[in-house]
Image: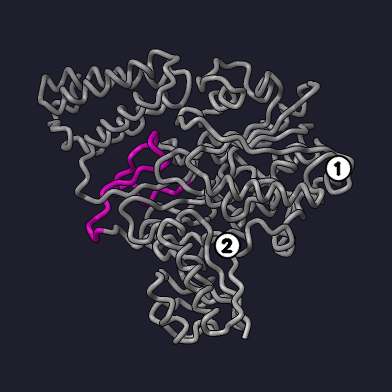
Amino acid sequence: MSATVYVPRDASARSVGADDVAEALAAHAAARGVELRIVRNGSRGMLWLEPLIEVATDAGRIAYGPVGVDDVPSLFAAGFLAGGDHPLRHGATESIPYFAKQQRLTFARVGLIDPVSLADYEAHGGLRGLRAALALEPAQIVEAILASGLRGRGGAAFPTGIKWKTVLDTAADQKYVVCNADEGDSGTFSDRMVMEGDPLVLVEGMIIAGLATGATQGYIYLRSEYPDAAVALDQAIAAARAAGVLGPDVLGSGRRFELEVRIGAGSYVCGEETALLESLEGKRGIVRYRPPVPAVAGLFGKPTALNNVVTLASVPIILDRGAAYYRDFGAGRSRGTLAFQLAGNIARGGLVELAFGVTLRELLYEYGGGSASGRPIRAVQVGGPLGAFVPASDFDLPLDYEAFVAKGAIVGHGGIVVFDDTVDMAKMARYALEFCAIESCGKCTPCRIGSTRGVEVIDRLLAGDRPRLQLAVLRDLCDTMEHASLCALGGMTPYPVRSALEHFPADFGITAAAHGGH
């Protein structure tokens, strides 16, 4: 008999033994005389079930997980290659409730295909967006992105079409497309999952960005901590180049676009777009003064379309299905979908792609299954280490850029880190300031010095040293950092500090009188 089994090559699955499971499956199949084809796919995003293996059957793909090496003999004995019953069997993968209720647009192929097979990519809708873009003028592509309502998925949520239009309208002898793949926020992994599970969609999105703006050279600035993504991207780029998708004659159109991966400097601040450009140019990663913005004078002083991974990976479906199709997902000014990432103290951690407007409560309980500890969830931090702490009383807040801003919070990259009722929120506020002090590029005083002084002020506050005075100084310091820092690292560090103070004053030993006094 012949069978096909899918075993993820995603870093999350590999970290819990997927490679060993793949070897064990191959060895047992050989010993039994079974012809077994093992496809190393991406992760489906149900991380608590990894390694999650899937078997292709007449009834569709059947999932088993989490599978360890010791489970392999019993799987064969149970006839799992034909979808046989087993304690680790979850039925059809796409019927698992966590997965079935999602709205997968950007992540439609992640976990479904061999990530670096161009044939597999095309068989599942790949390159249709690029072919549609090649039939349009640059301004028409930009208009489609504008009409879709796509906003940057890296944190700032700036309209992608406006950024691209600026690059298109700025005259220059050379333009660039740069992908910010320096995913460094705590609890975030959606960029990594795209790059490891469907890297060709990023390649396609970047080519379309080049067609839209007049750029002929692209760079993926990849964080150094993502070696698996680097391998997948290099393989995908090589496959695209060999097939004429990349190079001097994109799909026979006479249009040129080249692409390469550059490994980052291991610095959190290089996720800030201008520090990233400095690093990409071979210089120390420090923030630039603005204006000019990168869309006018970016890489090597040339107009640069700089977007993050999920933003660019969302582009092909817009060109393929149309702006209205994408815009119909979402709420308010937050259109389309976002890949929410559940991490921290959560029973079912993983990736959930849904339209904007879903509430935190739905994500935490319907998908996440509550805390891993079984204790009440006290707070979540949304949007990385610079995001505000959201208390349980606000869990019905819809995940929408404007709704969160109105509450002094951010959606950011969609990372959601969960804490149960044992968390000390004063320590979390202190950590935010300490993180900023460590990761600051040092260029501006409010960030460099303010974060260091902030740690000292919180330490004095927790020691009970004149709490009213320390609170007044801390609030003043947060105001200074927010309004005077050069970039979001210093400018947004006050978000977690203020939210912890506002919602959890008792953790700081603050009485009601002290909390209200200056």
Q: CA distance from mark 1 to mark 2?
A: 30 Å
Q: Position of residue 159 (x, y in %)?
A: 62, 35
Q: Which mark is residue 480?
A: none
Q: What is the tally of numbered marks visible in this picture?
A: 2
Q: Quadrant where the N terminus lies?
A: bottom right
Can residue 377 be found in the magenta stretch?
A: yes
Q: Is residue 493 left or right of residue 503?
A: right
User: Which callout, 1 or 2, points at the residue further toward the start of the chain?
Assistant: 2
Which residue type does callout 1 highlight? Answer: Asp
Residue found 53% across the figure and 84% down from its top: 32
Task: Identify the disc placed on residue 41.
Answer: 2
x and y percentages locating residue 516 in the rendered image: 19, 26
> Helix or strand or loop: what does disc 1 sit on?
loop
Foreground of the two, 242 or 155: 242
Quadrant position of the C terminus in the picture? top left
Q: Let me know if residue 450 appears in the view.
A: yes
Residue range highlighted in magenta: 373-399
- 236 part of magenta stretch: no
Name the one closer to the observer, 331 or 129: 129
Q: Position of residue 517 (x, y in %)?
A: 18, 22
Give how far across and how far down residue 470 sits, in percent.
Answer: 19, 20
